[in-house]
Image (tube, grey):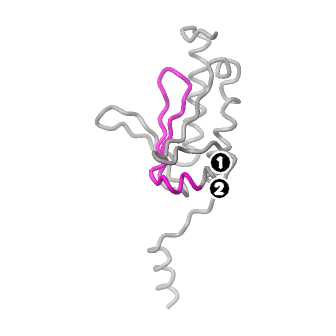
Amino acid sequence: MVRTDTKRFRKAFGQWQEAVISHLKKYGANFVIDSAGTREWFIQTPAGSLRVALHSDVPEIFQRFNDIENGKTFTDLSWCPSCNPYSGKWNFGYNNEDVLNDPVGCLAQWKHCIDSLMSIPFAKTFSERLEEWLAGK
């Protein structure tokens, strides 16, 4: 059992949080604090907007696809864990021992899933296709 009240664990947990945030920023995620005080990152993905929040005391990444069908399709077709087909929740949890021993390395699966999601070409919207069509006239 890993004690979470030690300086060593708090340092590792901080490194873990920074690794998550750094990876989100790589894809242009925006940080928002809403009126209820909820602290979330929003990242625009090819499957639509993905909300990401970190638990303040335990190593868990809470995510939710705004477009549940697109999120479900992506997670069903990838090797990544499936999102909840009803809510769009796509959470990743880690045990304290993994965070203590390798705070950045334990995120490999989550990083791979985000990288895979972001590697899908963004679909063009109707207005973008219309603009291209009008430009060709």
What element does badge 2 sit on? loop
**Of 36 and 136, which appears nearest the observer?**
36
**Of 111 and 83, which appears nearest the observer?**
83
At 49% from the left and 39% from the top, the residue drawn is 52
Q: Is residue 23 left or right of residue 54?
A: right
Range covered by the magenta-colored residues: 49-73
Query: Disc 2 marks which amino acid?
Result: Ser
Between the C-alphas of marks 2 and 1, the distance is 6 Å
- The magenta stretch spans residue 55: yes
Q: Is residue 11 left or right of residue 86?
A: right
Query: Disc 1 marks which amino acid?
Result: Asp
* Quarter location, residue 80: top right
Q: How dense is the environment of label 1, judged by Cα within 10 Å: few (below 14), some, or many (20 and up)?
A: some
Contact between marks 2 and 1 (CB within 8 A): the answer is yes
In percent of width and height, residue 41 lies at: 46, 41
Q: Which residue in the structure is indicated by mark 2? A: 119
At 50% from the left and 45% from the top, the residue drawn is 29
In percent of width and height, residue 39 lies at: 40, 34
120 versus 137 height, above or below? above
What element does badge 1 sit on? helix
At 66% from the left and 17% from the top, the residue drawn is 97
Q: How dense is the environment of label 2, judged by Cα within 10 Å: few (below 14), some, or many (20 and up)?
A: few
- The magenta stretch spans residue 54: yes
60 versus 137 height, above or below? above
Q: Residue furthest front?
A: 86
Q: Which residue in the structure is indicated by mark 1? A: 115
Q: Residue furthest bottom?
A: 137
Q: How many marks?
A: 2
**Of 18 and 49, which appears nearest the observer?**
49
